[in-house]
Amino acid sequence: MNSPTAVSSAPHEHTAEPGEFAATRLLAGWDATGRPADLTDHLRRHGQPPVATALGSRTSMPLVEAVESAGLTGRGGAGFPTARKLRAVAERGGRAVVVVNAMESEPASRKDQFLLAVAPHLVLDGAVLAATAVGADTVHVCLPRTRGAQYRQLSTALDERRRARLDPVRLRLHALPHAYVSSESTALVRWLNGGPARPQGSPPRAHERGVARRPTLIHNAETLAHLALIARHGPDWFRRTGTPDEPGTTLVTVSGAVTTPGVREVALGTPLASIVDHAGGPTQPLRAVLLGGFAGTWLPSEHLDTPLTRRELAPLGAAPGAGVLVALAHSACGLSETARILAYLAAHGARQCGPCHFGLPAVADDFAALAAGRTDPDLLPRLHRRTGLLPDRGACRHPDGAARLAASALSTFADDVDHHRTYGPCPAGHRSPLIPVPPAIPPETWR
């Protein structure tokens, strides 16, 4: 994938209607200056972070109530109500822990990396505010150890805050093994407790007993940045864009057959076609888009008028997921692209349960055979059967995402399936791949 460019919606202030690009929020500093914000820049733009029990001048609500009123949901993929997670940890009592999930193990996503590069203090403000609200004394910031430059940038940001004596809690930076499932919340807890960065399939849940057996709040980096803005400006301000049911903006990594791939900040409710247009438009006619990332869903181009909300996408079996939109041109082979992704997902399974150890590799092998035109009469029924068996059976949701991707590909590219089975692989299958997929090699270490 090309390096993301910092672009967003029009910089002028206005109240965006649903489906319209909102004025920049998370990326406002970058949009105005074109340079990453150090602590001085950040404080000049946003002011001192308010304390969680006495928020900014536009709201007198405690933080949890303000976030609940704003309707903020997690931007890491699951879309869980943020206030509900805050309240679950706060109600446990005692010393809690906050974990910033900045792993972004989704290969097609760059949004959290970009946000932390240009506005690190907005994320850290949100983490500290959340810690104050739930009674935590420590914030753990988790990054993959393969991103040395990002680690150094965040180390610098933390040093700035320490010198300024800005935070009432301790902030610690960690570099974890980089595997697809190592960004799963229970994998973070397991690693911080001295174990492997593999998902933990059994109770207790993190909010009950997580890091150091303490109640633990885990939030995605982007979610915490939104929280920091709600604390300053209030829930009414947050709801001025997006839709009534799904307010606010979100970051989307747009790639594939678009003129200017990169990270965009858009209002929830923006049609998918408008997001593609905002990335310079398609470079050639589109066949489909991959929405949500490698664990996401292929959608045919006729659905590009669908608004980017969970509610509108659900009937299509899709969701915003990790904030990824990959545009697939008509000249590409969707089956070949999917086969490469499935091979990567199979290699990066934690191998802790049957669906991950046996099911994912079997589905990946079947899909590779289909993409290559090496079919037998039982291949397609077997692929459908195996894909249907994966969901809701694993120790984590990794097999579910792979099954969703495979099933959507079989549906969206049904014409190609028939062609591959009858005539062998299509000419597009021999062209250079469109989607950058890491090698299908198991992680070297989980610790």
Image: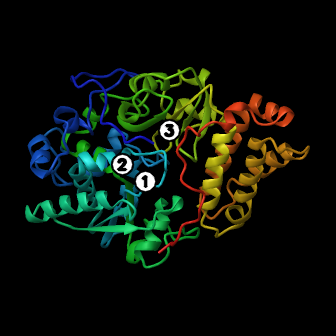
**Identity, as a three-letter code, of the amino acid under mark 1:** Glu
Q: Who comes first in sequence, dot 2 or dot 1?
A: 1
Residue 348 occupies quadrant: bottom right
Nearest to N terminus: mark 3 or mark 2: 2
Q: Residue at x 25, y 42 (%)?
A: 230
Residue 23 visible (yes or no) = yes
Residue 251's x, y, as percent? 38, 38
Which residue corresponds to mark 1? 104
Instruction: Give the Cα separation between the discs numbered 3 and 2.
Output: 15 Å
- Is residue 388 at least partly visible in the picture? no
Q: Residue at x 27, y 39 (%)?
A: 26
Q: Quadrant of residue 139?
A: bottom left
Q: Which residue is at a point 14% across and 46% down the rendered structure image?
A: 42
Q: Residues within 10 Å of mark 2 (few under 14, many from 20)?
A: many
Percent across and percent down for residue 237 are: 25, 33
Q: Residues within 10 Å of mark 1 (few under 14, many from 20)?
A: many
Q: Which residue is mark 3?
A: 320
Q: Residue 420 at x, y = what percent?
A: 80, 35
Circles 2 and 1 in contact, beta carbons < 8 Å: yes
Question: With 385 as the anchor, is 255 left or right in this view?
Answer: left
Residue assigned mark 2 = 112
Q: Secondary structure at mark 3?
A: loop
Q: Secondary structure at mark 1?
A: loop
> Quick check: 275 above or below 106?
above
What is the spatial separation of the Cα atoms under label 3 and label 1, in whole angstroms? 15 Å
Identify residue type, mark 3.
Answer: Pro
Nearer the observer, 319 or 158: 158
Q: Are marks 3 and 2 in contact (CB under 8 Å)?
A: no
